[in-house]
Image: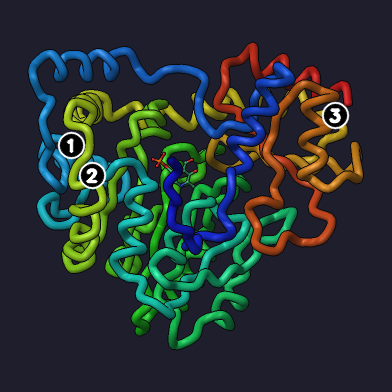
Amino acid sequence: MSFATPALVSRLPRVGTTIFTTMSQLALEHQAINLSQGFPDFDGPQELLDRVGFYIHEGANQYAPMSGVPLLRRAIADKLRRCYGREADLEREITVTSGATEALFAAIAAVVSPGDEVIVFDPAYDSYEPAIELNGGRAIHLPLLPPEFRINWEAVAAAITPRTRMIILNSPHNPTGQVLHADDITALQALVEGTELLILADEVYEHIVFDQQQHLSLNRFPDLAARSFIVSSFGKTYHVTGWKVGYCVAPASLTAEFRKVHQYLTFSTSTPMQLALGDFLLANPEHDQQLPDFYAEKRDLFNGLLQHSSFIFSPSAGTYFQLMDYAAISDLPDTEFVQWLIREAGVAAIPLSVFYQQPPEHLRWVRFCFAKGANTLQQAAERLRAL
Ligand SMILES: Cc1ncc(COP(=O)(O)O)c(C=O)c1O
């Protein structure tokens, strides 16, 4: 006997298998070096890993408080003060979440109503738009154009309508490796002053900023922080992306609405991970400060080997991604070029066009992830240099 499954009308008809899954499968099939995946191929600090084991054996295995364990929220508050001079109230302004992904979704769900518009900048991280759509909102895509990928603030001003609820910013930016500059902050301040606009700041790569630049976190600017959900992820900072622990900092009134969603989305986040992170953050505040040099060495190794190759690029300013222009190697569209690259060079990358709703014409860029061991980066660069 067979039973019929009711037919569904998809709530996300345009969403399919992500390019990340596709490229990783292809890389596996062809035994290619995988620089497409956006995560490290090395582990987090041993002391941090040991603390998780410690807490599991101590019996810290039941639900954590909804807003996060006090130890970790205190460590986050300390970090905000130390890095950005922000005094955040850990009871009412800091919420620990199951990765930045949950925080992004909860912030959007908390404030976006049917018909609302949300400005996103393409190339955009792929979780923003589905979250906006599921809540009845509409993403207004503004392009960041090569080779600089900077925000055109006049275009932003022109895109704002009475329906605009929120602007989503991501700095340091995945996939371009760009960061916000002081003039971007000034333009943003002028744009939002006196309006009801909210900001969602995705700052998951906050500690991976190169060349002595300062990360311009919105936490530094009280006028912007007063209207922002600022989201980060421990996965990126401590090389533990699989733990999925992140957090959101927002003024008390925004946090109250944020927590209403978080409470019914996940309720709380893994207890032993939170406690271990709390201990590690408090004991090792220098870890964040060492991260730029740690990743700059990898960036410079990879880029150095490709300096006299046919790829054209300027060094990434932040994140662990490097964009490269391959126009001198091939005229294939990027989605075809990455497949060719796997077959011919045995290196997997991500095409840039998939991050755009409407990719600019003749886009010939790919993204490489350099959060990999030195041998892997060396081998990949040698293969790419031969093209
Ligand atoms: C820009 C950006 N935002 C958010 C996330 C998600 O972070 P998490 O793994 O903590 O959910 C990522 C992960 O790759 C990212 O690159």
User: In the rendered structure, which amino acid carries the disc numbered 2?
Assistant: Val
Q: Nearer the viewer, mark 2 or mark 1?
A: 2
| 251 relative position to 230: left or right | left
Q: Would you identify the image quadrant in which residue 258 lies?
A: bottom left
Identify the secondary structure beneath mark 2. Answer: strand
- Mark number displayed over residue 72: 1
Seen in the picture, residue 318 relative to 104 is either above or below; the reply is: above
Residues packed near mark 2 inside 10 Å, few (<14), some (14 to 19) or many (20 plus): many
Q: Whole-percent x and y of residue 174?
A: 56, 46
Residue drawn at (43%, 59%) of the image: 131
Identify the secondary structure beneath mark 1. Answer: helix
Residue drawn at (77%, 21%) of the image: 346
Residue, disc 3: 309
- Mark number displayed over residue 262: none
Q: Whole-percent x and y of residue 313?
A: 75, 41
User: In the rendered structure, which amino acid carries the disc numbered 1?
Assistant: Leu
Residue drawn at (53%, 28%) of the image: 295
First in sequence: mark 3 vs mark 1: 1
Identify the secondary structure beneath mark 3. Answer: loop
Residue drawn at (26%, 51%) of the image: 265
User: In the rendered structure, which amino acid carries the disc numbered 3?
Assistant: Ser
164 and 94: which is toward the camera: 164
Q: Whole-percent x and y of residue 53?
A: 21, 14
CB atoms of marks 2 and 1 within 8 Å: yes
- Mark number displayed over residue 96: 2
First in sequence: mark 2 vs mark 3: 2
